Image: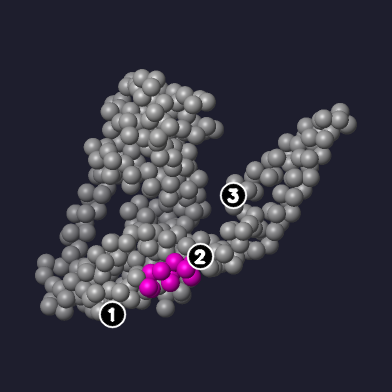
């Protein structure tokens, strides 16, 4: 390997083990999940450090506040970090561009390293408190009709859980569609124009440096490369996959895949419209019935819609609810809660 990962904690792997494990690790964002160690990024270099699993006590997600992100308020923009706790309380925080990569690492660790806790100590306490509050909200006994609704929704959720990739793609495609619908197209083309100027400036700067023409070649080159990297990293420029037509097509395809799957539901007619067929929606409907907010399936779906409508940038929510809402709110917004 070109750069051997640096040892971060007290435990270490020998050179041969490290090379083999680093080479075979699953790369997710700037980090990597190996069989023997977790590989973590520095600010500039991906997978710069390694920590054997024997050193790690916790790995969890931290979402920093940005406009509309989880500060307890809002549900969309966020700045995600992966936090690794090791050697008796030391922490290493890794910055990510995409929160889904953090979630993917945590999901993989849950399967391959079940001994590692995936919540902070404060998060575990908060979760326990929330579970106790949720249990207290549940009715001591349900009516026959309400129990029937819970049974119907539970079976439907189990059917969706059997194909998690469908729900994941539906959520991601609808979120991307929502972002596209809310963005002003002119911004993308302004970014493209500036980036083209950046290409020209970089080319001129390189030419000036090579031919010793003028005294400002380095500045043109630096400006050009900065403009190119800035707008490409933020996915602002329209490309073959990052344009209105392809984004809308992806959302339609995801909905069609879910619709085709629920048509084969063995329990008869699926209890919710296929555009809202997501395990999180079904679970929140079940909660609504168990907490006495609804009795029938339509009432439970209305309860979910009302809660989603109520959550905006001025409403404080817990991290767990934020994680749920961010998966499903876009699909309701895109269909105007119909």
The C terminus, quarter of image: bottom left
Q: Left or right: where does residue 107 sit relative to residue 1?
A: left
Q: Nearer the viewer, residue 206 or 58?
A: 206
Q: Is residue 289 magenta?
A: no
Q: How is the image coloured?
A: one colour
Q: Which residue is mark 1?
A: 269
| Residue 233 screen position, x and y as percent | 60, 46
| Residue 7 screen position, x and y as percent | 40, 22
Q: Nearer the viewer, mark 3 or mark 1?
A: 1
Q: Left or right: where does residue 45 sit relative to residue 197?
A: left
Picture residue at 46% right of the left edge, 74% below the top: 335
Disc 1 residue crowd, few under 14, some 14–19, many 20+, Cα 10 Å: few
- The first of marks 3 and 1 along the sequence is 3
| Residue 307 seen by the camera | no
| Residue 99 screen position, x and y as percent | 44, 48
Disc 2 secondary structure class: helix
Q: Which residue is mark 2?
A: 250
- The first of marks 2 and 1 along the sequence is 2
Considering only vertical position in the picture, is 183 above or below 263?
above
| Residue 225 seen by the camera | yes
- The first of marks 3 and 2 along the sequence is 3
**Magenta part of the chain:** 250-260
Residue 28, quarter of picture: top left
Picture residue at 40% right of the left edge, 35% below the top: 24
Structural distance between the alpha carbons of marks 3 and 2:
20 Å
Q: Nearer the viewer, residue 215 or 28?
A: 28
Disc 3 secondary structure class: loop
| Residue 315 screen position, x and y as percent | 40, 60
Picture residue at 44% right of the left edge, 66% below the top: 254
Q: Which mark is residue 232?
A: none
Q: Which residue is mark 3?
A: 234
Disc 1 secondary structure class: loop
């Amino acid at each position: 390997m070109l750069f051997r990962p640096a040892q971060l904690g007290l435990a270490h792997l020998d050179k041969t083990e490290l090379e083999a494990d680093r080479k075979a690790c699953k790369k997710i964002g700037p980090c990597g999940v190996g069989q023997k160690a977790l590989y973590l990024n520095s600010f500039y270099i991906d997978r710069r450090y390694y920590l054997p699993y024997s050193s790690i006590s916790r790995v969890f997600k931290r979402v920093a506040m940005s406009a509309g992100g989880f500060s307890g308020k809002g549900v969309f923009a966020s700045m995600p970090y992966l936090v690794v706790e090791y050697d008796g309380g030391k922490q290493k925080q890794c910055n990510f561009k995409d929160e889904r990569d953090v979630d993917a690492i945590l999901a993989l660790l849950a399967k391959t390293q079940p001994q590692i806790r995936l919540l902070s100590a404060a998060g575990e306490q908060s979760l326990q408190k929330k579970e106790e509050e949720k249990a207290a909200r549940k009715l001591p006994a349900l009516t026959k009709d309400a129990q029937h609704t819970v049974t119907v929704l539970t079976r439907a959720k189990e059917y969706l859980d059997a194909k998690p990739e469908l729900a994941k793609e539906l959520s991601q495609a609808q979120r991307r569609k929502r972002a596209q619908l809310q963005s002003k197209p002119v911004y993308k083309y302004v970014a493209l124009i500036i980036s083209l100027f950046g290409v020209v400036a970089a080319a001129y700067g390189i030419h000036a440096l090579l031919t010793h023409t003028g005294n400002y070649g380095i500045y043109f080159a630096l400006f050009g490369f900065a403009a190119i990297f800035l707008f490409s990293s933020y996915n602002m420029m329209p490309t073959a996959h990052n344009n209105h037509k392809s984004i809308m097509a992806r959302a339609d395809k995801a909905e069609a895949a879910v619709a085709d799957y629920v048509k084969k539901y063995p329990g008869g007619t699926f209890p919710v419209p296929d555009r809202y067929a997501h395990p999180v929606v079904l679970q929140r409907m079940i909660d609504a019935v168990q907490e006495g907010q609804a009795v029938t399936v339509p009432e439970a779906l209305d309860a979910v819609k009302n809660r989603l409508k109520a959550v905006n940038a001025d409403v404080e929510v817990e991290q767990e609810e934020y994680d749920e809402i961010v998966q499903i709110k876009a699909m309701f917004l895109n269909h105007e809660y119909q």
